[in-house]
Image (cartoon, rainbow, N blue to C red):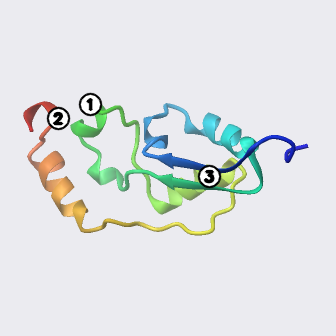
Amino acid sequence: MKDLIGFDSAVLINVLEHLAEPEEALPRIYEALLSGGRVIVLVPAFNFLFSRFDELIGHHRRYTLKTLAKELTSAGFSIKKNVYFNFFVMAGWWWRFCLLKKTPRTQ
């Protein structure tokens, strides 16, 4: 029944961190995918980088590879690849938004 109507892919770029309860949305996305469908997920990483800036732009959380994998597998997804990228930006983000406490209004 799942293959009658659905999507072959879903792309969630900077979406999950804005949802108060992503564990409710992810199973619905999984069910909307055709068998063999794929999802690409991009989320902000590392709780120690969570700042006032995150709050002001509506983030509820940041993820680690483990926490993201747990949410996805709990919804039924299997993980093919789970990686950090853009690692070099981390120091600048920490400096600007955690240490200097910059916000969108003070930039």
> Horizontally, is 26 left or right of 94 in the view?
right
N-terminal-most mark, 2 or 3: 3
Mark 1 → mark 3, Cα distance in angstroms = 26 Å
The foreground one among 48 and 14 is 14
Label 2 crowd bin: few (<14), some (14–19), many (20+), radius 10 Å = few
Of the residues tagged 2 and 3, which is closer to the observer? 2
Q: Give how far across and how far down residue 32 sits, in percent.
A: 73, 41
Q: Which residue is mark 2?
A: 104
Judging depth in this view, the residue of 98 and 32 nearest the camera is: 32
**39 left or right of 97?**
right
Q: Is 88 in front, or is 67?
A: 88
- Identify the residue shown where x is 20% and y is 54%: 93
- Give x and y (percent) for residue 57: 30, 33
- In the figure, 70 relative to 5: above or below? below
Single out the residue that lies furthest toward the right.
Answer: 1
Q: Which residue does the numbered mark 1 point to in the structure image? A: 56
Please determine whether, in this image, residue 86 is positioned above or below residue 1: below
Q: Are marks 2 and 3 in contact (CB under 8 Å)?
A: no
Q: Earlier in the sequence, mark 1 or mark 3?
A: 1
Density class for disc 3 (Cα within 10 Å; few <14, some 14-19, many ≥20) is many
Classify the position of the C terminus by image quarter: top left
The kind of residue tagged 2 is Pro
Q: Which residue is mark 3?
A: 72
Three-letter code, disc 1: Leu
- At mark 3, the secondary structure is helix
- The structure residue drawn at horizontal position 24% and vertical position 68%, both measured from the top left corner, is 88
Residue drawn 69% across and 61% down?
Answer: 78
